Image: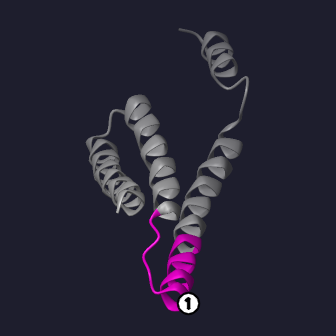
Amino acid sequence: MDREEILAKSRNENQKMDERERDVIGQAGKIAALVGAIVCMLIYGIDYTFAEKYSPSCFIIYGSIMVAMNLVKYIKLKRKNELALTIVFGLITIANLVIYIMSFVR
């Protein structure tokens, strides 16, 4: 491959986003996940303090987001740690979903 072919291939690969934009989007995703976790903990604290009960609904939503995010990362990057995170978040989300459904059955 000569220089022009390499440059043309690089341009085709980066048509939609440049490297900086991909990095910014990745950082934004990490920060959004952290903020989501903090908000869930805050809502949990408020529910437990004032209603004296555990409400898993917020963790179901957050867990679903984390499962989807890590699953896509695993599919695209084939990293085993992403698969492990997908499984862990999936199990936690399913457990919270069962708790949520059981609260209506009782």
Where residue 81 appears, as percent x and y from the top left, is 29, 48
Q: Is residue 38 left or right of residue 75?
A: right
Q: Is residue 17 left or right of residue 44?
A: right
50 is within the stretch colored magenta: yes
Where residue 103 appears, as percent x and y from the top left, is 39, 63
Q: Main secondary structure of the magenta part?
A: helix
40 is within the stretch colored magenta: yes
In which quarter of the view is residue 80 placed?
A: top left
Q: Is residue 31 left or right of residue 20?
A: left
Q: State which region is magenta.
A: 39-56
Image: 93 above or below 39: above
In which quarter of the view is residue 83 placed?
A: top left
- Residue at 44% in and 54% down: 63
Image: 59 above or below 91: below
Instruction: Give the farthest residue toward the bottom.
Output: 49
Label 1 sits on a secondary structure element that is helix
- Residue at 40% in and 34% down: 77
- Residue at 59% in and 49% down: 26
Where residue 4 appears, as percent x and y from the top left, is 67, 12
Q: In the image shown, does 15 or 85 lie closer to the viewer?
A: 85
Instruction: Give the farthest residue toward the front.
Output: 106
Q: In the image shown, does 13 or 89 lie closer to the viewer?
A: 89
Residue that badge 1 annotates: 50
Colour scheme of the picture:
one colour
Where residue 18 appears, as percent x and y from the top left, is 71, 36
Query: The C terminus appears in which quarter of the rendering?
Result: bottom left
